[in-house]
Image (cartoon, grey):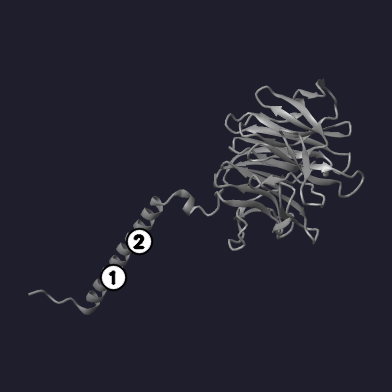
Amino acid sequence: MTPRLPRPALRTRIVAVALAAAVLAGVAVTYTVHAVRRAQPAASVSEFGLDRGHLYVRDERGGAGDGRVARLPLDGSRTGGRTTGGPTCARFHAAGGTGLCLQRRPGIPPKSYAVVLDGELREKRRIALTGIPNRARVSASGRMLAWTMFATGDSYAGSSFSTRTSILDTRTGYLVKNMEEIPLTIDGRRYHSPDVNYWGVTFAADDNRFYATVSTKGRTYLVRGDMRRWSAEALRMNVECPSLSPDNTRIAFKKRVRDGSSDPWRLYVLDLRTLREHPVAEHRSVDDQAAWLDDHTLAYGLPGADGRRSDVWTVPADGGGEPDLRVKGASSPAGVGRR
């Protein structure tokens, strides 16, 4: 005959059995969740990364000093909303699973960092810089990075500014700290001058050829460069902040159309085969290195109505259509396409 347990002992045994069952259930749930997570691709469980089919911007809704990276649907859908959660950057660009974030840091003279990011926008490398962040570009493959800093001044509108442009090969780790030593040819002759400034680099699909702006003696030129030969050749005058189209056939750029004014530039597109240019339908002055969202659409930043932040606009590259306000309170647009 099985002896009966006293009531307190029986109650203790029931509680122990219930706790054990709860623990086993918790272990089973935890195991199932981890198994499901292991079965899912990494992108589906990532909270924020460089996902294809998205437009990335520097979010300025809290004021121009905030600048956290955010993303929206690349197709222009207004239903997707803006997702924040990226790093804080003064300038940003991304392509080919690589991000480039230029960050300000306290100090006099002005100091900054160039931060190289992976596809999950996690830091891979940090380079200390001197100056104010101005332009950032990543090649389509994600291999080549370029950035421009204002060494003195903070605007291209006047003549009292100096820039320093660097190029980083992420595959080899080789860093060109300052482009100014590259052998330059203008009008068929090797050119030397102490006032040479470079800015606004854009890379071709082969990660060797590149285009940039060079300024000297009060003139600006579009130059075509070769990384392997380490040389640059001027192609034409009055081209600033070039941006190469995805099909590598055209360059969007800002052209100076008025001197001595607060709105001196207009956005143009140059056909590299014919060297013919045409203005786009944006009639306001654009002081930005436009980004190609695809082979037909340009995105760029313009000052917002409140004067505290920028807005991102888009316009057809063929000269038709009209400007469209794409993202309010944002700058540094970068499209991560589906291909």
Whether 175 is drawn above or below 247: the answer is above
Q: Quadrant of residue 102?
A: top right
Residue 100 % position (x, y): 64, 42
Give the alpha-carbon distance from disc 1 to disc 2, as whole Å: 17 Å
Q: Quadrant of residue 94?
A: top right
Quadrant housing the N terminus: bottom left
Nearest the eye: 54 or 279: 279
User: How many C-alpha atoms fall within 10 Å of the one at disc 1: few (<14), some, or many (≥20)?
Assistant: few
Instruction: State the SS at label 2.
Output: helix
Q: Earlier in the sequence, mark 1 or mark 2?
A: 1
Q: Quadrant of residue 13?
A: bottom left
Residue appearing at x 76%, y 48% in the figure: 280
User: How many C-alpha atoms fall within 10 Å of the one at disc 2: few (<14), some, or many (≥20)?
Assistant: few
Residue 78 % position (x, y): 62, 62
Q: Can residue 222 be seen at all in this image of the molecule?
A: yes
Residue appearing at x 60%, y 33% in the figure: 170
- Disc 2 marks a residue whose amino acid type is Val
Residue appearing at x 49%, y 50% in the figure: 43
Residue appearing at x 86%, y 34% in the figure: 219
Kindly give the residue lying farthest to the bottom in the view shown.
7
Residue 212 % position (x, y): 74, 34
Whether 78 is drawn above or below 218: the answer is below
- Disc 1 marks a residue whose amino acid type is Ala
For the residues carrying marks 1 and 2, which lies nearer the camera in this image? 2
Instruction: State the SS at label 1.
Output: helix
Q: Which residue is mark 2?
A: 29
Whether 238 is drawn above or below 226: the answer is below
Nearest the eye: 41 or 27: 41
Q: Which residue is mark 1?
A: 18
Nearest the eye: 283 or 16: 283
